[in-house]
Every structure is written in structure tokens, then in C-alpha cells.
Amino acid sequence: MAVWVEGATDKILKAAKEEFMEQGFLMASLRTIAEKADTSPRSIYTRFANKEELFAYFVKDHMEYFRDEFQRYLTRFESQSVEEQVEGRETGSSHCLYELTDYIYAHFDAFYLLVCCSEGTLFEKFIEELATMEATYTDRYMQHTAGDGKKPEIDYDFIHIMSRSFFEGYFEIVRHRYDVTRAKTYIGQLLKFSEAGWSQFLQ
């Protein structure tokens, strides 16, 4: 039976967070983490099955919260009438995004790890997952609002590319470590720019 030294877990987590943020998941070393925490790799393995599970400790819950809140917004939006969707499309998405931005800044290091340091883990697909969600709902929105059996001007592939581009742009606030005031100014500009383009195709 493993003996857990008092305070060892906190030291491991502190060292692991520093190592992941400095080196990224792929280059991070459990041996280095153990050395920084004044313990052994075996001590880490008594707490976490592998390096990815250790990385997941910092990001999993926050990734799921962001994704699930965005999913709830999309589901609520789609449940509205076509008229309500058209009327509230711009303001609803802006409100959702600003709320999620507040969440990011309440847990900034976790999102830095998620966006900038997760290559080599399942979490590196986070932005792609958001883009796919957005593209799927946008495609259905366009089908619903086209009217009279008309075919939308753009197809799913184009919608997905634009959705991916938007989220890559959105998470620049994390990559560049903007303070929250600058981030919200930037997001306002990004939303304005994005809306100008989508207004050419969406009702």
C-alpha cells in the first residue's frame, strides 16, 4: 500500500502545472515534475495513471463546462421559433460568448493549458469540437430559415471552415494572455467582423 506523504500531492500538482505550461504536454517530463516536487515518479503514479491523466486534472472539468454551456446555448436557440431565432441570433450569441469569457478568466491557467499546451492529448480537439457544434447548428439554422424550399448559398464545409476560423480567433485572447478588458474589446471587434460576413448569408 502506497504511503502518501503530507503535502506531496500539492507539490506534485504545482510542479506539474509549471512543467506543462512551460513545456507543453508532449515535452513535459514526469521525471522533471517529480524532481521539482522533491519526490519520485513512482509517487506520481500512485496518484495518476499516466501523464495524460495528470494533465487532465487541470483542464478536463473546465473544458467540459465550456463545451456544455455552449451546447446548452445552441440547444436553447434551436428550440425557439424561426422568428425568434432570426431576431435574437446576434445578441444571443454575443451574450453567451461574453459569459464564457468571464469563465475563462476565472480559470485562465486551465484554458492556457487547454489551448496552448494540449497537443498530444485528447484535449487538443477542443476547438475543433466547438467548431463542429457551431457548424452543425448553423447549417440547420440556414436550412430552417431559407424558406420556400430554397437551398442555402453556402454548404456545410464552408460553414465549418468559418466556424473553426472564428474559434481560433476567439482563443487568441488566451494565446496572447490579454487582460480581461482588452479581451472583451477584442471579442466585440471579432463579433462585429464575423456578423458583417455572416449577414451576407444569414437572415
Image (cartoon, grey):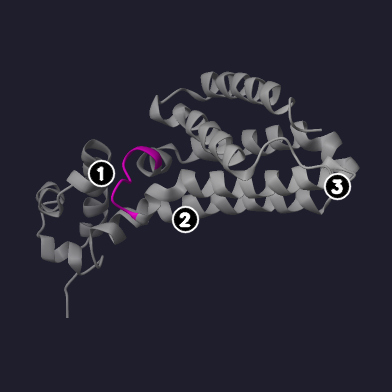
Q: Nearer the viewer, residue 159 or 109?
A: 159
Q: Which residue is denoted by mark 1 in the rendering?
A: 20
Viewport quadrant of the C terminus: top right
Residue 109 appears at what percent x and percent y? 38, 39
Residue 119 covered by magenta stretch: yes
Q: For label 1, count other residues whose C-alpha is less than 10 Å away and answer few (under 14), some (14-19) or many (20+).
A: many
Name which residue type carries label 3. Answer: Gly
Q: Which residue is denoted by mark 2 in the rendering?
A: 61
Q: Nearer the viewer, residue 22 or 15?
A: 22
Residue beneath the point at 12% across and 60% down? 41
Name which residue type carries label 1. Answer: Phe
Q: Which residues are magenta?
A: 115-121
Q: Secondary structure at mark 2?
A: helix
Vertical comparison of 45 with 189: above or below = below
Viewport quadrant of the N terminus: bottom left
Disc tally is 3
Q: Are marks 1 and 2 in contact (CB under 8 Å)?
A: no
Residue 134 appears at what percent x and percent y? 62, 45
Disc nearest the viewer among 1 and 3: 3
Q: Which residue is denoted by mark 3 in the rendering?
A: 149
Q: Secondary structure at mark 3?
A: loop
Name which residue type carries label 2. Answer: Asp
Disc nearest the viewer among 3 and 2: 3
